[in-house]
Amino acid sequence: QLKALVAASAAEGGGSIVVRLPTVPDAPLIGQRVLIEGLQAKPELNGRHGVASSFDGSSGRYCVSLEDGGSFKLKPANLSKAAAPPARASSSTAEPAAALTLTATEKALQERLRGLRTVEDFWVFRRMGYTEAENPSHMGMIMSGNSGMVVAPFQSKQLAPTAAEYLTALEAALFGGRAQGVKPSSLAVDEKGAVARLKLVLGPVGIQAGYYPPPTEEELSAMGVPP
């Protein structure tokens, strides 16, 4: 999956911002956290949040991945841009002390990130496939919701990236690419196991971290990615 994006990245020589995503110019909500409202046919969706991952030009609807699961195609009139989710209160069950202790590398990254100005942008870390057959090189892309651009490629040792690998990719994109002294206000990854650690490291420096479900076949089709 997403072989088209991988090929485009390789053709450009693997730099920072390498290729424009297959988006529709009049779809400004792509990559944004959105609030669903005013639905008549599915009123149970009103008030729920999700991310507009792509736009289907043939139907004139966004493909929205809900934060609590599920995916729907919705009209722009039923969506509005939403703020980043508020930080959740800590669980009554404390994590082990070792899990709450930052490594020297994480602390050093925090110091570097504190020096960057925050911009309202939502970065999504997407893997280029979710099986070894689809993604034998374990490649992924960082995508900007604001610009609809691929910010940078990244690679992990295993099929599922670790929090440390996501942080390394973020640092490379911010300080080795074209971020120009700014950091996104929020980011999301498609590997649930890494989210808690990312929140621990990035929350104190102004970057909200969360989970972004892998794309459905319908979303991939809307993005123009062949099966």
Image (tube, rainbow, N blue to C red):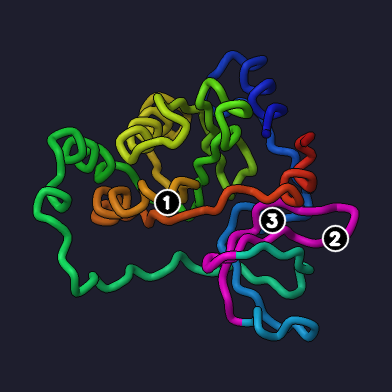
| N-term mark: 2 or 3 | 3
Give coordinates of residue 123: x percent, y percent: 50, 46
**Mark identifier at residue 58:** none
The magenta region covers 47-69
Q: Earlier in the sequence, mark 2 or mark 1?
A: 2
Tag 3: amino acid: Pro
2 vs 3, front mark = 2
Q: Residue at x 60, y 73 (%)?
A: 35
| Residue 60 tag number | 2
Per the image, label 1 sits on a secondary structure element best described as helix
Residue 204 image offset from top left, x and y in percent = 24, 55
Q: Is residue 178 magenta?
A: no
Question: Could you say whether the residue bearing mark 2 is in a helix, strand or loop?
Answer: loop
Are the residues tagged 2 and 1 within 8 Å (C-beta)? no
> Disc 2 residue type?
Gly
Front residue of this view, candidates 69 and 51: 69
Contact between marks 3 and 1 (CB within 8 A): the answer is no
Label 3: which secondary element: loop
Circle 3 packing at 10 Å, graded few (<14), some (14-19), many (20+), is some
Separation (CA) of disc 3 from disc 1: 27 Å
| Quadrant in which the N terminus is drawn | top right
| Quadrant in which residue 149 is drawn | top right
Q: Is residue 47 above or below residue 100?
A: below
At 51% from the left edge and 29% from the top edge, which residue is drawn? 152
Magenta stretch: dominant SS? strand
Specify few, some or many for label 1: CA neighbours under 10 Å numbering under 14, 14-19, or 20 or more. some
Residue type (three-letter) at the residue carrying disc 1: Lys
Vertically, is 17 above or below 144?
above
Within the image, what quadrant is residue 174 found in? top left
Q: Which residue is mark 1?
A: 192
Q: Which residue is mark 3?
A: 28
Please state, as top left, top right, bottom left or bottom right, where the C terminus lies in the image: top right
